[in-house]
Amino acid sequence: MNQLRRDPITGIWTIMLQNGKEMVTFKPDGHRRLRRARPGETCEFCAGHEGETAPEVFAVRPNHSPRNEPGWNVRVVPERVPVLQIHGETNNRGLGIYDMLDGIGAHELVIETAAHGKILAELAENEIADVLTAYRERVLDLKRDARFRYILVYKNVGEGRRGPSLRHSLSHVIATPITPLRVREELTNAQQYFLLKERCIFCDMIRQELEATQRLVAENENFIALCPFASRAPFEIWLLPKRHETFYEWNNELPSLAKLLKLVLLKVRQALGDPNHLMIIHSGPNLLAGRQRGYWKTVERDFHWHLEITPRLRGMADFDIVAGFQVNWIPPERAAEILRQCTI
Ligand SMILES: [Zn+2]
Ligand SMILES: [Zn+2]
Ligand SMILES: [Zn+2]
């Protein structure tokens, strides 16, 4: 019989098909396989094209080359067509029963490598660590601004852009004047759990999954990778620090995270081909903004940052769209088993 499983952290219910025709539906459909760059292709994010982007706000330059010149490993620039603007005030107001804010925020692009067409999994571990460091530095900087309640770091691999720049490996850093709904649900559920049990729900989950082992994908000294119990999509993977930690940007073991992330991404590649996928970091909220309003009083004890990877293997079914349930046709126990068996 199929199961309905509830994720205790997100509160999301997923229908878990137990006898999905996995061998047929396992690999991404045609649109969801990563498109590789053509030889000689370039774009505005390539080395030597620095003048085509907005001036950089951060870069990793091992040989101290001048700003907005070649010689960088990672470069962060404001998005030319941002979804939210940096200048101004949020101007919170009501229109009868409706609430409205001005679109204040920040939208930055992390150019993960100077090499066009190279994907994150193909970078060396120290280069991936540079990317993770760029995330950390940008989050720390943007959190100094009390207008921003949340800083979201994500990458939407294979989707979201058009033309050659689709094939240049990028991440987004978005600062928002409200907490994104999905994150707020996690924060609220973690807080509720803490109020009841005085423990972090993520720490409890990690302990249970390390004992049960059937949903474990990989681990190292500092981090664990697992397929969550109520995975919303096949091969959903979460990476978490083993030690309790609320804020991604406070982590000082990023080389160790880079190592596990590379391993996991290579396993996904081996098991599934190169599927488009989403990678999101869920860190604690901006305390500077939250404390002013009396929010998140126990967050440092109840919330535990993590990185979520969701491969996109096919479009949503009608039922997902209409009912808001997720339907997953490969149980996480099976997905984790397949990923464990991939030897890199
Ligand atoms: Zn490029
Ligand atoms: Zn914890
Ligand atoms: Zn999360």
Image (cartoon, rainbow, N blue to C red):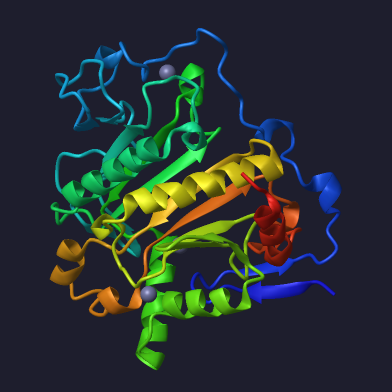
**Residue at (30% x, 38% y) in the render:** 107
Vertical comparison of 120 with 239: above or below: above
Vertical comparison of 215 with 25: above or below: below
In the image, is 207 to the left or to the right of 52? right
**Residue at (37% x, 69% y) in the render:** 304
Residue 188 percent across, percent down from the top left: 39, 75
Asked whether the viewer can see residue 294, the reply is: yes
> Where the C terminus falls, by quadrant?
top right
| Near-viewer residue (103 or 249) | 249
Vertical comparison of 48 with 193: above or below: above
The picture quadrant where one finds residue 269 is top right
| Near-viewer residue (190 or 219) | 219
Residue 150 percent across, percent down from the top left: 28, 56
| Near-viewer residue (198 or 259) | 259
Quarter of the rendered structure image containing ligand 3: bottom left
Asked whether the viewer can see residue 322, the reply is: no
In the image, is 306 to the left or to the right of 234? left
**Residue at (28% x, 44% y) in the render:** 133
Residue 170 percent across, percent down from the top left: 41, 32
**Residue at (35% x, 89% y) in the render:** 198
Vertical comparison of 252 with 60: above or below: below
> Where the N terminus falls, by quadrant?
bottom right
Q: From this viewpoint, which residue is outermost toward the top? A: 40
The picture quadrant where one finds residue 36 is top right
Count of numbered badges drawn on the protein: 0
In the image, is 240 to the left or to the right of 2? left
Residue 60 percent across, percent down from the top left: 24, 32
